[in-house]
Image (cartoon, rainbow, N blue to C red):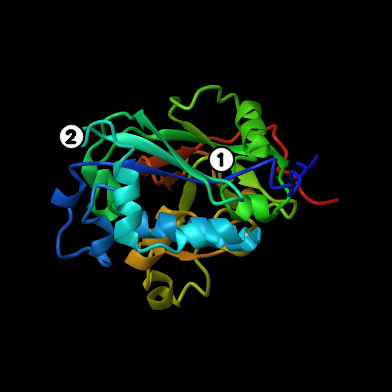
Amino acid sequence: MTSTPPTTSSDSFQIISSLRYEPALPNVVDERAADSHLLTTPYYLLPYHQDRLLSAARCFKWTKAAEFLRQELGQFRQFLDTFIPDKAEAWRLRIIIDSNGACKVEANPTASINPMNLLVPSDTAQSNTWCVNVDSESTTPSDFTTHKTTARDGYTAARLRSGITSPQEQAEVLVVNPKGEIMEGSITTPYFRRRKFGSGNDSASEQSGPIWVTPPLSSGGNAGTTRRYALAQGFCTEQVVSALDLVDGEECWLSNGVRGFIPGRIVLNGSRRIPLER
């Protein structure tokens, strides 16, 4: 079974981006971080969040929303500042913009984390490992999987099929397209150890470059902010990842704009069939 994309009526959805306000973030940035200007304010990867919202507004041809999002970054930050209840605390921000360019920001308390988890995994402190399942049904790629919107019924259904009933659970489900390719996680970007190619004598080429890969956008997943950051940092490269290639118990990484980078472990049900296009 495949999920049905929502309608494109501008009254039925808004574009969104969720990010962390972390007052300790500027203190963990060091000179090794590429594009460190992205992390010098408490708003985690704010320029990328503004970019992703603008990209979505352009995709859906929301002229007024695009006009709002083209404002100078400092001005956008000042706008967000008005929604922070206490600048000494960490917050989960949810930026919501409609087709008329009206923007609201929801600020909710969020769990404390080691700010080092907001950097790429090679520089992070270990945190609790999440259980990572694979969805038992496929999802059809669309503008609503490429861009983050309030039309998230397909992701909610995938989580419920995997037995995840609370956002507080340390668990994730990987969304699969009709070709059997991993698209993304329901609330995260996944990263997998690189599958080795070439002959057994080609060890040099096998070992060069990053050892982690993330699914390309052509597989249908979201153009996430931490995904963009991980690629810019050189932590990973893009590579198609088939659900059939995943191994029970293998380690992986997950990331999103609120929690940063999280270690995970694949858990497969031996009787589960990976959804393939018929």
Would you name the residue on which mark 1 appears?
A: 186
Q: Residue 55 occupies which quadrant of the picture?
A: bottom right
Q: Specify whether 241 is left or right of 79.
A: right
SS label for mark 1: loop
Q: Residue at x 52, y 75 (%)?
A: 199
x then y, percent, for residue 220: 64, 56
Q: Specify whether 152 is left or right of 234.
A: right
Q: Specify whether 45 is left or right of 158.
A: left
Q: Residue at x 45, y 25 (%)?
A: 169
User: Given contact means CB atoms under 8 Å apart, are the residues at marks 2 and 1 in contact?
Assistant: no
SS label for mark 2: loop
Q: Residue furthest right?
A: 278
Visible in this render: residue 214? no
Compare residues 53 and 192 and report the one nearer the observer: 53
Would you name the residue on which mark 2 appears?
A: 88
Q: Amino acid at mark 1?
A: Ser
Compare residues 134 and 43 and report the one nearer the observer: 43
